Amino acid sequence: MTSPTRVNMRLVLNAALVAAGLGLSAAAAAQDYPVRAVRIIVPFPAGGTADVMPRVFAEKLSQKFGQPFTVENRAGAAGNIGAEAVYRAEPDGYTLVSAPPPPFVINQSLYPKLAYDASQFVPISIMGAVPNGAIVHPKVPANTLAELIAYIKANPGKLNYASQGNGTTSHLTAELFRSMAGGLSIQHVPYKGTAPALTDLLAGQVELMFDNLGVSLPQVRAGKLKILGVATEKRIASLPNVPTIAETLPGFVSIAWFGVAAPPRTPMAIAERLSAAIAEAAKLPDVQKRMVELSAEPIANTPAQMAAFMKEDAERWRKVIVSASVKPD
């Protein structure tokens, strides 16, 4: 009769062999990956930076691996529809999501219930980031951020700020500014997207907007708008004479970053393989040229670095959403 101890040892050994076999098969799959087409779902409409940037990298990934990397737009619900589709996809590396912050680090604090858990995505890399800036209409009598804060304090409730909509990065950045500057009294005017908000800012219907520079910088360079600060930790190379907002409000950071992630339980070896390829592509002269055209700074970090950044950014925006009682449209 076989003893219980021997049976238990046999079960443990079998489990270990199965686990080792699964590990070997996952490693082998990652080494051969990809062997067929890869879909990159962008949960926002075509045409914007969120759509253009992954297309730049998808082209280079296709060339490197000899397999199609196609971008598919699946917009709606602030990125939640596309994010959910990837969340429920097979964890084999053949369906990825590429998006700016909302579905990764904002929506879980903004919406009372989501059909996906953003913390369970497997990070791959943040391809690049476009700084947000404090943009004002020329009629605003301020040429520095300190002057703007002083003007708002002297004229409470007089200035209106535009955003791309409730809960968007531009809205949350303005609320972060309002809070860090001492609870400024400024009025929020939400729009449905960047284009109508920028149109009214140019017309002077609203006076202030925290916008990503990929969209508004051409208007600044044309003299139609003024930029008072960039929301990065350090001054950016393309605007060396423009101070950071953090020089006036220490710790102020808000960037529109664009990351790639995989469904939960995707093997880390696949994420690392893709991350290395993205980093390689980011060094190519034509990719760097396209990033400059998008007013973007290349990042191309590792899965671990992206995970750490997402955790920090999620906490930053959670605090803003809670303190300002921000609600989605």
Image (spheres, grey):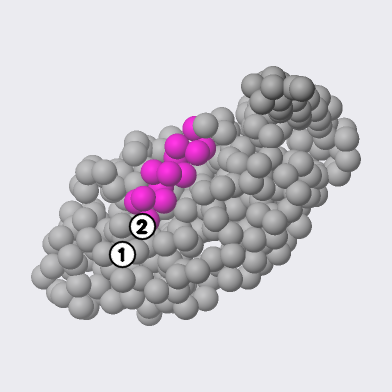
Amino acid type, mark 2: Arg
| Position of residue 178 measured from the top left corner of the image (x, y, whole percent) | 24, 63
Q: Are marks 1 and 2 in contact (CB under 8 Å)?
A: yes
Residue 58 location, quadrant: top right
Residue at point 48%, 62% (across, down): 107
Residue 284 location, quadrant: top right
Residue at point 37%, 56% (across, down): 317
**Location of mark 2 (residue):** 318
Disc 1, SS: helix
In this picture, is 125 found above or below 151? above
Q: CA distance from mark 1 to mark 2?
A: 6 Å
User: What is the tally of numbered marks visible in this picture?
Assistant: 2
| Position of residue 67 measured from the top left corner of the image (x, y, whole percent) | 87, 38
91 vs 35, nearest the viewer: 91
Q: Where does the magenta region start and end?
A: 305-317
Task: Determine crowd level at label 1: few under 14, some 14-19, many 20+ residues with C-alpha closer than 10 A.
Answer: few
Residue at point 27%, 58% (across, down): 177
In this picture, is 60 found above or below 47? above
State yes or no: residue 312 in magenta: yes
**Location of mark 1 (residue):** 322
Residue at point 19%, 58% (across, down): 181
Disc 2, SS: helix
Whether residue 106 is visible to the viewer of this picture, yes or no, is yes
Whether residue 30 is visible to the viewer of this picture, yes or no, is no
| Position of residue 63 measured from the top left corner of the image (x, y, whole percent) | 83, 33
- Quarter of the image for the N terminus: give it: top right
Amino acid type, mark 1: Val
State yes or no: residue 288 in magenta: no
